[in-house]
Image: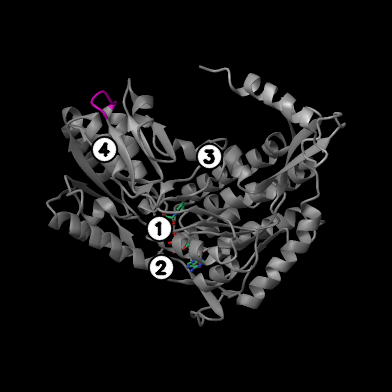
Amino acid sequence: MTTIETTPAAPDTALTSVDPATGEVIATHIVADADAVHAAVAKARTAAATWGTLSFEQRRKHLLRWSTQLVTSSDEFCALIHRENGKPLDDAFLELMLALEHIAWAAKNAKKFLSPKKIYPGVLMSNFAARIEQRPLGVVGVIGPWNYPVYTPNGSIAYALAAGNTVVFKPSEFSTGIGNFLSDAFKKANPELPEGVFETINGFGATGAALVTSGVDKLAFTGSTATGKRIMAAAADTLTPVLLECGGKDAVIVAGDADVKAAADAVAWGATANSGQTCAGVERVYVDRSVSEAFVAEVKRILTDIKPGSGTGASYGPMTMPSQVDIVRRHIEDALKNGGTAVLGGPESVKAPFIEPVVLVDVDESSEAVCEETFGPTITIRTVDSVDEAVELANKSKYGLSSAVYSKKNGLEIARRLRVGATSVNSVLAFAAIAGLPFGGVGESGIGRIHGEPGLREFSRPHAIAVQRFAIPGMALLSYSRTDSTMKLLRKVVPFLHGRHK
Ligand code: NAD
């Protein structure tokens, strides 16, 4: 671990990690400049020659040993997550548990989904054997956020490693110690592996920017949409492929036939857990008029007892990033200015670094609180007259990360109409806990998928191979020796193969 310091360090050479609840300095980390980033990528490239040629079984063994190491050190790790990120210890443990589920899934399923496949070559190429072989990309750069500092980047790291890539990871400057703990655990669990299979580089945006242009074979980013756009623009220069997991403004639809108590319980938690700093957290609710009054009353009842803090009784922690506090306050004020009503809390709920739950109803749909990611423990609830209206308003967002639907009879049908990457029916955020399901957004929520089979494929490239098993006399299609009689035969065969459907 890094040394404990008492004063903040100069931001160009060192990074100070602080406890967001108290402002106390936890540690300082050396900031990686462009040369250090290039050196880490070079080390990872050398290691890729070993790691990329191991069998799926061998990589599985190393990944599962990493899990065991994380479990063994879970008390220490969760204490660090609590201290550096601010979330309660139980939430830190739940986050670690989800990350472990994903490591296990990626380790155990890589062989199934990435093994070579035989492909039918078609009648005209029947003298060929065709196959697809998935190859690792090489070195994957991962840039992570601070809100789920283990679970979120792990969605790229574990799947990239399982697919045979080495990884250079730049954790958020607000969760540097946590990011380093993750890669140190991998190294501790696998001392016989060469250095560079999973490296961490520390720093601010400039270190991340250097990683984007360092020659990595793919850049997997999780963070804000604004940074995602900058990364995609920078990566375009070298056509470095990007995976972008960005912001959201997730909506929940509560239909007239919903279990109102269950919906209110899930919405109250989904909007405020982790101080609302959840990319796929509940930000907006559209509730049918027939159940609206009961629903709002129940959400208010539940959240009245929910309090932030850093002690053992706290439901959620402080805002991790100080600058986010002003954004949350601005959204609440804007909502109230635009005709909204606060049925619980208001601007006075912002008591930095903590924010108490705020419930806003019937806020104008064009206000910031409805259109922009708030990323705080607030929620907007709008009463609608039909499911159609709810779907239309939910889909109006420029974001499209995930969503939830509460309906006893029509949940699946409503879910299918939503323009998002994932939906939970009669639950919130459930898709994120099922390792086999892909995660990612549409629109300004990002490009590509982590988790599940698509998450493994993101970190491999299909290599198509056609092997000529024997030559068919007179059928040399890919040669100047092709004869007129071959063409005559083809003119008869093609209508039979492709011209018979009315
Ligand atoms: P952020 O965009 O400020 O920072 C994310 C990372 O990018 C950090 O490591 C940062 O140092 C780095 N960075 C900043 N500028 C860079 C640049 N020019 N080039 C390269 N890297 C750069 O985001 P944040 O505040 O850390 O995280 C919160 C955001 O992340 C929210 O918008 C949230 O919705 C989103 N998020 C999305 C998901 C998802 O899976 N879709 C998951 C978690 C968080």
Callout 2–callout 4 Cβ contact below 8 Å: no
Magenta stretch encompasses residue 364: no
Query: Please, what secondary structure does the residue beneath circle 1 have?
Result: loop
Q: Against 372, is 256 above or below?
A: above
Dot in front, 1 or 4: 4
Magenta span: 255-259
Q: Residues within 10 Å of mark 2 (few under 14, many from 20)?
A: few
Query: Who is closer to the viewer here, 441 or 121?
Result: 121
The residue depicted at 65 percent of the width and 50 percent of the height is 160
Callout 2–callout 3 Cβ contact below 8 Å: no
Colouring:
one colour
Disc 1: which residue = 310
Left/right of residue 277 with respect to residue 234 in the rendered view? left
Q: Residues within 10 Å of mark 3 (few under 14, many from 20)?
A: many
* Amino acid residing under circle 3: Pro
Percent across and percent down for residue 2 are 62, 71
Q: CA distance from mark 1 to mark 3?
A: 33 Å
Disc 2: which residue = 22
The part of the image, by quadrant, that contains residue 178 is bottom right
Q: Name which of mark 1 and mark 3 comes first in the sequence.
A: 1
Q: Residues within 10 Å of mark 1 (few under 14, many from 20)?
A: many
Query: Please, what secondary structure does the residue beneath circle 4 have?
Result: helix
Q: CA distance from mark 1 to mark 4?
A: 39 Å
Magenta stretch encompasses residue 256: yes
Residue 264 in sight: no
Query: Who is closer to the viewer here, 179 or 52?
Result: 52
Q: Residues within 10 Å of mark 4 (few under 14, many from 20)?
A: few
Query: Please, what secondary structure does the residue beneath circle 3 have?
Result: loop
Callout 1–callout 2 Cβ contact below 8 Å: yes
**Numbered badge on residue 392:** 4
Dot in front, 3 or 4: 4
Disc 3: which residue = 438
